[in-house]
Amino acid sequence: MNRFLKLVVFLLAAIYFLVDAIFLTVAKSLANWIAEHWIFESLRAWIVSLPPYPTLALFALPLAILEPVKPMAAYFVGTGHVATGLILLVVGELLKLVLVERLFSISRGKLMSIPAFAWVYWKYSAAKDCITSMTAWQVMRRWSLVAQYVIRSYALKLKAAQSPRRITFQSR
């Protein structure tokens, strides 16, 4: 049973880091891009001005709206519309991650002032710490970092090979 549990954790870690490498990298880049634009500054100021419980409602809104995208995407894939289902899943997850990440980073202090939210967040953090401390998880994390490095270096080499070479003129 213990061996089976380790295999399950290993597989879950592999899937998690694959999804994490794909979605979270794009989501954080997109969230940072959004944060840098002045257009969103007034929206940020409005969010910061909200009291804790309306902030919690605003934080829960993207989850409530975009979480049903997963079963809808699975339905599309199951009925033979694979491309539509995958696009729906990718766009919905990216949008959800970006919105939730930005809202949490803007209003973390207010959300943590709500006792029930703070309790759930600390329980989530404790469970995450427990799972990430497992050996199988750490091995998959190292493999994920190696894979990211290999892909990044390959992409840089490919980009360098495709860029036009400088023509230098030598005087005789």
Image: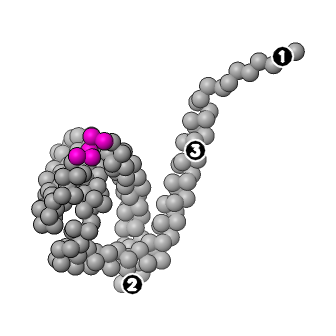
For the point 27% across and 79% down, the residue is: 123
Say whether disc 1 or disc 2 marks the residue closer to the N-terminus: 2
Near mark 3 (Cα within 10 A), the count class, few <14, some 14-19 or many ≥20, is few
> Is-magenta flag for residue 39?
yes
6 sits to left or right of 109: right
For the point 27% across and 40% down, the residue is: 39
Where, by quadrant of the figure, is residue 6 drawn? bottom left
Q: CA distance from mark 2 to mark 3?
A: 39 Å
Indicate the quadrant containing the N terminus: top left, top right, bottom left or bottom right. Answer: bottom left
Q: Nearer the viewer, residue 126 or 54?
A: 54
Q: Position of residue 89 (x, y in %)?
A: 25, 49
For disc 2, the marked residue is 2
The mark closer to the camera, 1 or 3, is: 1
Say whether disc 1 or disc 3 marks the residue closer to the N-terminus: 3
Q: Position of residue 27 (x, y in %)?
A: 34, 51
Q: Which residues are magenta?
A: 38-42
Q: Of helix, strand and loop, which one carries label 1?
A: loop
Tag 3: residue type? Answer: Tyr
Q: Nearer the viewer, residue 6 or 61?
A: 61
- What mark, if any, has residue 154 been given in the picture? 3
Q: Of helix, strand and loop, which one carries label 2?
A: helix
